[in-house]
Amino acid sequence: MTSTDAQALVAGVLRSPFAHARIRQIDTRKAEAIDGVRAIVSASDFPGGESFQQSESGHNGMAGLFRNVIAHKKVLYEGQPILAIAAEDEKTLQAALSAVDIEYAVLPHVIDVQKSMEPDAPLLHEELVTQGIKPVPSQPSNIAARVEASSGDVAEALANADVVVADEFTTEALYPGGIALPYCQVDLLGQDRFNVCTHRDVPDDQGSLIAAMLGMSKEDILFATGDGNSVSQSEKRTRRQNCSTAGQSVCLEPLALMLARKTQQSVFLSMSREDVLMATAAVPGSYISMRLGADRTGRLAAAEVVICMQAGAFPGGPVQQAVDAALASYQFPAFRVIAYDVVVNRPMVTHSQASGAIGVNFALESLLDELARKLSLCPLALRKMNAKQSNTLHDPGCRLAFQGIGASIEAAESHPHLLTKLEENQGRGVSSGAALDAQGNVSYCTHICDVEVDNETGQVEILRYTAIDTDIDGQAEDCDVQVAVTVGIGRALNEAYCFDENGKLKNASFRDYRLPLACDVPEITVVHSGDSQRCGSTSSMLPPLAAVANAIADATSARITSLPMSPPVVLAETQRQKWKRRLRR
Amino acid sequence: MTLLKRQFIVNGCTNEVEVSSHETVLYLLQQRLQRDDINGGCSRGDCGACTLLLNGEPVHACLVLAAELTCADVIETAGNMTLNTGNDRHIVSAYQNYAPGVCDFCRPGLLISTKALLSEMPTPTDERIREMIAGHLCRCTGYDQLVEAVNAAARAISEDAA
Amino acid sequence: MDYRQPLTLAEALTLLRDAVAPVHLLAGGTDLVPQLRGVNDPTLTLVDLKRIKELSEFIIRADGSAVIGAAVSAQTLKTHRDFKRLWPGLHDAAALIGSRQIMSRATLGGNICHGSPAADTVPALIAAGAMCRICSSDGERMVPVNEVITSPGKTCLRKGEILVSVSLPARLLRSTDAYLRITPRKKMDIAIASVAVNLTIDESLCVEQCSVALGAVAPVAFAVSEVSEFMTGQRVDQAMMARLQRTVRQACRPIDDIRATAEYRTQVAGVLAVRAFEMAFDRVAENSSRDQYS
């Protein structure tokens, strides 16, 4: 993306090379002395910063969001901004960035969510004490919060259940963004008033946050949308939460604004692909332990769920979404859902596109499949039997008021996809999902997926895919569902952020973090069913993970509970199954 | 740093520019020629957003150095396609009608790749289409719309020829 | 950075001989250009090889032998009918190098000299018995392709040398080759393991000659020499395939990385070897009744 203003200063960010370190000293004198360097800003330049630091802890709420944007005294994730610099040209900027001297005291880091919960884990925040536990813990930890939703006597219900299925599921952090690179151009509109043009729509709440960080009133910052073209208000649809720009949290705008303020000149700040992958909000990885009990007709009796979810470096991950995902679709007479918001040395995670629901949906829809298998029931019939019809009984702790996923399940039951014959090494899986989109609408869906597994290499090919979604008009929205499915397939089979022993991202490129391409997915059939509520396709982000896992299980009898289901994982699991069967004979 | 003089054609117009030895054609087109019909998403040839035609062949502009260009080199970007008649027009219309989900960032590269694809394969199967646009990452459509658009363009072009 | 575009081979070789500072050779640029990003070294010399006619030659003779200039693009190889007919394995390998945009620019010489253990054309070239013509202002030498890459990212090219072309030997009757690879996703990815098989059979469908080369399972691609010991003169059967699979697995020396574990690479290399052999065998059995060289 190029600056539209030849007079604009070029800006860049100096980012932490470490996942976890104390900043001992920053020396910018050499950088400042370079001819053509116009401004250098750090956390202490932000007027709002002080008030954030003074709040009860320097990591919660606004303080956390602020420090996610720019580090103060400590760096908590690789790529965390420490300084932003504006210069007259690119060459000067690079020279200035190289001329800054920073002394770090490197600390041990933690990224794995389970490791971060252990008592001897490296502590990210010395004053972070778990909220939601009584009595209040005396020791700090990386567990920012514990959230619980329960009803009835789960232990008794499970003990009395005819059948219990249980398993542990792990998902890794995922890239939620698109192809466009983030940028921010700030122009002066007058005395301390700015026009901000970025690659995305800045939501109102983020606009307020940015203004607060700068100690300014929101009216003095105008947010326009770039996108390469100017888009008039009337042309803009209610912006679809498409994958291009959804899920992006505040990162460049405060830095560019502060530089524009200091220099009283236009500033253009952009990010490289490597920085985006390394330092912007990811979908949180999680560990989930789930136990479901049912009677022999398939009626669910109880659910016991523990969710441990990465928050990123600051508290406030989408744990409520996770709780909702466990409870929103199916009726559990007794349930106990516990979710832990756990900080790790990574950027703050995203809440968009049902990011908190992904892991739980994977677990729940996989276990329902196991239940169906154990009871020799049709997986769709099992889901329909237990689908919530209406939410007259408000489940404590669950936000979603729900009409019922039954309509999409029924539509799936009668879809001709189910009649397509499967050959050897092929399998079929179904999965449902429900989610709230950014506008607050609930959407729900049921997906059917056919796969072929190469049982000598573990490679999985998606043969057919049908997504039944709630009724939406227009062709454009078909593609929202299709892209959600494509994103889901990529995550199911191939995607994960990988880190080395120092907590540095190993796959910071689209070559090594490979998103799905046209040749990776089949034609995706979208069907609209149910009532005519207009809603988005956010829910379609969820089912592909379990739909693929269930299809693989159908083809190979191998139940895979960790994502991604890459060829080595599939091969190892299918071979284990083969041995198990051989030993039973 | 010495600048090199380069002369080359972009969408039928001759350009004479001074370039540095390490800048890419993407930089040249975006920054020096201030074109808005080409975008870059990765700088490594992974995303396809910067695709243009160089002497009729699709290439990543971020992988070609500006210094490599000679006066015999002809570059085509998507910007001209809306102005052209004939096949270009069919391709642009097909994307408007059948792939409205494609965003402004990726569309230029996709239009150019479609142009190249259809000149090499006037009647591609869906499978071949997916292979040919496998050099493009799309996070807006799930690729079905792209296949439809290419098919529609192929139909329109062949009807024209008939 | 000093950018030069020599018009003849002699000019290029003189340039290289006289260069004081580090020199990078530029062909398609698909590997080199991203590496140069952010590099601000005024002493570096970049030599663009694309104008040199010897590097753009592509000769295929009736007997199947070939001379392929190092700057010939992957797309040129992919679309060449005779090349596909005579060397289908090497053809398939070249066609897998990357997306259509990459294929326009990537070159055979670049694929070799970038020195990636997972480079697609290298196992197929090794199995084919390809020779590399390496020139300097002092003269030239022919080096078997498996000796050109010495370690990941490094070649045997000395200062002042350029890989000018790759030569393929004449095709024996009843010969063909095959190339298969495993990638995390079906296409458009870097090989986790790859196998090339070059096969000649006799009239009774026994193996007359067989070369098997592996990629992505060791620091450099290499031929599995033991294969000819148990295959030459033998009938193709299940026992031979099982032995091929075992031999290939024993020869692997892979690493763990983000794409796959060493264990997985070894496992699938064996699977691929059998599949590639069967592919080559079916091809040549089908072709042997036809006259290959029309």
Image (tube, helix red, strand yellow):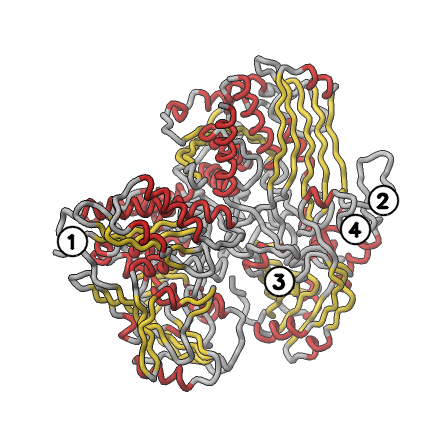
Helix, strand or loop under label 1:
loop
Residue A516's spot in the image, x, y percent?
Answer: 46, 46
The answer to which of A322 and A230 lies nearer the viewer is A322
Residue at 68 percent across and 56 percent down: it is A19
For label 3, the residue is A186
User: Between marks 3 and 4, how big is the CA–CA gap?
Assistant: 33 Å
Helix, strand or loop under label 2:
loop
Q: Are marks 3 and 2 on the same chain?
A: yes
For label 1, the residue is C292
- Which label was assigned to residue A125? 4
Label 3 or label 2, whichever lies nearer to me, is: 2
User: Between marks 2 and 1, how big is the CA–CA gap?
Assistant: 79 Å
Task: Give me the chain letter of mark 1.
Answer: C
Label 4 or label 1, whichever lies nearer to me, is: 1
The answer to whether the residue labelled 3 contacts the one labelled 2, judged by CB atoms less than 8 Å apart, is no
From this viewpoint, is residue A495 visible? Answer: yes
Helix, strand or loop under label 3:
strand
> Please, what is the three-letter code of the amino acid marked with disc 1?
Gln
